[in-house]
Amino acid sequence: MHESKSSGAQNIALALGNNLSRRSFLKILMMTGAAAALPGTGLLRSFSQEGPVFGRATFAGPGAYQTFRNACPRNCYDTCGMVSYVKDGVLEFVEGEPTSTYTNGGLCVKGYAYPRTVYSPDRIKYPMRQIGRGSGNWERISWEEALDAISGKILEIKEKDGSLLGMALTKYSGNFGITHYGVEGMLSSLGYTTRFVGTPCWPAGIDAQNYDMGNMWCNDPEDMAQSKYIIVWGANPAYCSVHSLKYIYEAKKRGAKVVVIDPVLTQTAVKGDEYWQIKPGADGALALAMARHLIDQGLVSREWVAANGLGYDEYEAYIKANVTVEWGAEQAGLPVDVVKRVAEEFAAADPATIWIGYGMQRHVNGGVNVRAIDALVAMTGNVGKPGGGARYGHLFTWGFNYNAMVQAAPEGSVGYTGATGPKGEFDTGQGADAAATYTDRTFNINKIGQEILDAQDPPVRLLWIANKNVVSQDFDKNKIVKAFEKVEMIVAVDLFFNPTVEQADIVLPTVTPFEDWTVNVSYWHYWLHLNEQAIKPLFETKSDIEIASALSAVLNAKQPGSCTFPQNIDAKEMMIKEFNDGIYQLFGITSWEDLRKGAAKAKLPSSASWSDLKFATPSGKYEFKSEIAQTNGHTALPEYKAGREAYAPLRLLTPHAKHGLHSQFQNLDWMHDLNPEPLVYVHPKTAGAKGIGDGDTVRVFNPTGEIRLKAQLTNNVPADTLLMYEAWFGAKNGFNVNLLVDDVSSDMGAYKTGSPGVAIHDQFADIEKVAA
Amino acid sequence: MSKRYAFHVNMALCIGCDTCAMACKNQYHQEAGIVWRKVYPVSEAIYPHRDRAWMSLACNHCDNPPCLEGCPASAYTKRDDGVVVHHPDLCIGCQQCLHTCPFGVPQYNPHTKKAEKCSLCWERLDAGLQPACVQGCPTGALTLVDLETFDDPSAIQFPPGFPHLPEVGPSTRFTLPEQPKIVRRES
């Protein structure tokens, strides 16, 4: 690019994509600002009647604030440490944790919106009861009334069924603070119940890495700066892990090459040296093709696979017999010479790494595709090296006590007698009582609609939903809402009147991180963050464990011994009880109070996972051939597995958004200022053939459902693909990508998380123009 | 020697993540609809991929600020360090500055009935801190520089898409975005 000689006004008009005069340009600029702020839009003094005053602010000086340590718990790679600045009891602003080299003093667009999350006029303030699900006919009730109704239902179920299996819990990642596992604890303290287990997020890849290496364990992301070659494969850190970008930039600055492989020309893709537009689901075929070329060229690290691999020769034999570079490149839709060149470059670089994104395992062949990519990293000798590695995620730093989670069933509880697996990826087995005759009944978290429809003996009578906006985020929304009709009582614990709360009978108001005590770690970086209570809980909000404690008190008053959850808990004491010597040692601290001064990082023997090359597999080797995989119904080798057959003309991708994390943040008015409405992204060629112009209203539809929204034309997406970013835009907007995403499972996930994942990106749809 | 503060917008590093824009709201709590910093997409005529290159813009704290020159209430001042400050106590809400600023920076706030704009966080600068947007930027794309000493050879004052107004002297400097090699699908 060069400095243009044409007039500035013309240029800046071009920047907006229109050949406008300067005057009209300014008009557009102003529409985004003052002119759009019509009189009548609410002032920020939302709570002047009864709460602290949150209004216009300025920086009042370094000594003007009390500061607290907080952590963002919203299921993000970055899990940022935060410093909150409080004045007169009001959270005035937040900053990134300066003592963490990862967070590095800054947050992201979502994290900086937190003051608005706390003081949003849309927050749920009191327990409320809805007369008629979906009616919006809410009445304020007291905590006593709410807990009386809920405890009454629990005792009624026990009486009727002789067990509490009719009470079910679905909970996931709305808040990953360790004390929030007290929700599971609350259910355990009531007896044996039904649990929706697994994870919608990353299970296929977790299983894949467990088959290959015996665990999911990634290098410290900060060591990407040392990489000489980085392939970002199906991950979009520019949206989903903004603090990781600086390490990739640093590697580039030191001469590394960065290749981004993605079906979409993402924001990350344009920051690499090279972008490959892969056909969705062809990741395994591409990795196999690259492996074939390494074999043909003698570029396999023979020494590494001989010393550290199990079954490598069989893997090579499989590839030689079944894979050609030409075939794999064609599957992926990529030129053969390009695939060969990058395979060679990757093998020549030392160290070289692949960041395996969660998007690429959300396919019917996603798990085995991750295995093929793992193998590529291993056969070039890059596993176990600083700056190398098949990076996916880790749970290395999650060794807390789970004190709030581990609760005993009341004496005499009756439960389920069938076999069950792990209850999600964070299940450490600490909650299992080997001597118990009974267990919980487990259902697939990713098929909540179907499971409730199918449930019998007993059916799901009472559903508890916490840390999860099921109706927005789970699959096949219409089926879920229909299944909910079968449930006698639905209780939701939440911050906002989201689509799940809309379907609840009782909603219990909960706290933001700033009103809570907990502790947080990441599944990506290796920092530990304390989360202090910075402000008093607003209105009548309670944390998950405070709700459990209050429910326990009511139940024990009604029927002594019916709930073992501790009563009259202190949230801070509960947080302290999650720490143990292992955590203190790992992080090099002597007390949790050290964390009040700043974040701590795990003392790792190496920035590399598996640096001693002792793998946690049965053989202790990197298992190119995994017997466990075979026992679990997969191929022992990471063999080619075809993707899902198309069931509509266009591929539909619904990945993570820039302005939200799942259904959080995008609902805030502050976020609407930056991203006002959902869009479907369509290739101009596809749009042209259907008479769709930029900004036209369209209908996107498939057998699962339909959505109406505006189209944006862009060749960032392939011509055979539609793209919508998942989000909840707030109560007045019905946009929900899961109207179009069915609940078909991915191949893996059941081994380590209790349920297979969902083929979120193996979805298809059609599009047509409709009247606006 | 006095300082001449300016923003350096490195579009090669910028990911358009809007963190800077929200970091500003986090600090000042502007009402919904009012944004002091906005991240504009660069048009496809300049960067060939839609919504993939960005220009993070706030007040340009100009050498010869038209807002200041045109203000009948003397509600604008320019500090020795270059920061152009709007004084709400003096502002009469006449909106003259909305018309004189060639970059569309000042906004009229119907709640306060006054104009307002980016202050370059002078209160933070005076406390030895970075502006909120700069501190928030996760990639180092937005930095605060002193034009008296700034000598990044990649930096330009008038990139394509930005009004070429040397007489006004906007202080913001830009580094242009780069493009990757792109391998699109053959089938």
Image (cartoon, coloured by chain):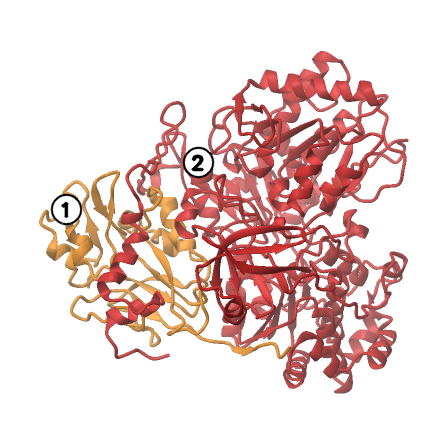
Chain colours: A red, B orange
Q: Which residue is mark 1?
A: B94
Residue at 33% from the left image edge and 77% from the top image edge: B153
Residue at 11% from the left image edge and 57% from the top image edge: B69
Q: Is residue A687 above or below residue A576?
A: below
Mark 2 residue crowding within 10 angstroms, few (<14) / some (14–19) / many (20+): many
**Amino acid type, mark 1:** Cys
In the rendered structure, the answer to whether residue B162 lies left or right of residue A620 reads left
The reply to whether residue A241 is visible in this rendering is no
Q: Secondary structure at mark 2?
A: loop
**x and y, in percent, of residue A595 in the image:** 55, 42
| Residue A181, quarter of picture | top right
Q: Which residue is mark 2?
A: A120
In the rendered structure, the answer to whether residue A374 lies left or right of residue A538 reads right
Label 2 marks which chain's residue? Answer: A
- Judging depth in this view, the residue of A742 and A167 nearest the camera is A742
Q: Are marks 1 and 2 in contact (CB under 8 Å)?
A: no
Q: Is residue A59 above or below residue A769?
A: above
**Amino acid type, mark 2:** Ser
In the rendered structure, the answer to whether residue B181 lies left or right of residue A198 reads left
**x and y, in percent, of residue B84 in the image:** 20, 55
The number of callouts visible is 2
| Residue A167, quarter of picture | top right
**x and y, in percent, of residue B4 in the image:** 23, 62
- Judging depth in this view, the residue of B159 and A674 nearest the camera is A674
